[in-house]
Image: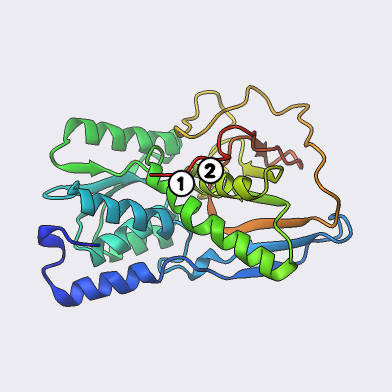
Amino acid sequence: MLTQDSRTDNTDAGTSAESLLSAVGSTPLVEIDAGEEAPVGTRLFAKLETVNPSGSIKDRPVARMLTRALARGDLRDRRLLDSSSGNAGISYAQFGAALSIPVTLVVPGNASRERLDRIRSYGAELILTDPLEGYDHAIATARRMAREKPDRYWYADQYTNDDNWGAHFETTGPELLDQVREATGALPDAFVAGVGTGGTLTGVGRRLRQAVPDIHIACVYPELFPGIEGLKPLGHPDDLSPRSWTRPSSTSGSTPRRKRPSPPVSTSLGTGSSWGHRPVPMSTPRAIWLPRGASDSWSPS
């Protein structure tokens, strides 16, 4: 429900918001060429998250974070505040406009013009940080603003908000299981995604591991800033990591365990940036397993 005093007085606005929220998720799974490097029989799929309303997977966690915050009354007389490299910012701005929530976003100054223009088009306030300071500086700036003015801002904090990965546990993961089973007659053998807030691979990984305990789960990340827009560098010991992240001391010498017999089904999330629990630098053409123990029977509240 979207009820919160001043947020849904206008019936047309409320209807528009409901329509926007109902369009999130249930994205198609498409098969792509696995390439000559893949073992014979490998099938590779991508989840087409670009069909979400704002064009990225970030709509899933943002919709969940905002609707739950509204239900708790967290946004009454306060602005939504968070940091973003771009995609989550667009989603915050779009949903904020639909739900009549004022939005303030802290974004590195090297975000693309297209992303910044889209955020501004929804009426969100933008605070740009020095790009040379890296994305972690934008996170630190948002945290400082929230700490200094708690009555002005509700800090969504996608890096520690359990509704981030919870959205993927409850929607993206089950969709993948159903779609891969329908396409292949089997469950996925592997899941790969990029590095962002930790939400996608944490939530999807936990859900997939419940169904396939030995599934091969890997993430990809740039080792150093600026890397790739939307993917967070983790190559420096001081790089900030989310609460759900378990940073290994080293990835050198890691050897993936053997899986069930081929042909494997490898499922790759095509759009959206997230990380799992074991990283793979882009310079390293290997996959590292998401370790057992963190996920098998856990579910979000």
Assess disc 1: are there few (<14), some (14-19) or many (≥20) residues with their C-alpha within 10 Å of its C-alpha.
many
Q: Quadrant of the C terminus?
A: top left
Q: Relative to 182, does residue 116 appear above or below in the rendering? A: above
Mark 2 vs mark 1, CA separation in Å:
6 Å
Q: Residue 175, located in which quarter of the rendered image?
A: bottom right
Let me know if residue 70 appears in the view.
Answer: yes
Q: Nearer the viewer, residue 148 or 184?
A: 184
**Circle 1 is placed at which residue position?**
165
Q: How many marks?
A: 2
Residue 180 falls left or right of residue 154: right
**Position of residue 114 measured from the top left corner of the image (x, y, whole percent):** 42, 62
Residue found at x 70% / y 46%: 215
**Position of residue 82 measured from the top left corner of the image (x, y, whole percent):** 31, 44
Residue 229 falls left or right of residue 146: right
Let me know if residue 110 appears in the view.
Answer: no
Regarding mark 2 in the picture, which secondary structure is present there?
Answer: helix
Q: Quadrant of the N terminus?
A: bottom left
**Callout 2, which amino acid?**
Thr
Q: Which mark is residue 202?
A: 2
**Position of residue 298 measured from the top left corner of the image (x, y, whole percent):** 50, 40
Regarding mark 1 in the picture, which secondary structure is present there?
Answer: helix
Residue found at x 73% / y 56%: 266
**Callout 1, which amino acid?**
Trp
Q: Residue 2, located in which quarter of the rendered image?
A: bottom left
Residue found at x 57% / y 71%: 28
Q: Look at the numbered discs 2 and 1 and tell me whether their residues touch, using CB distance below 8 Å.
A: yes
Residue 248 falls left or right of residue 190: left
Q: How is the image coloured?
A: rainbow
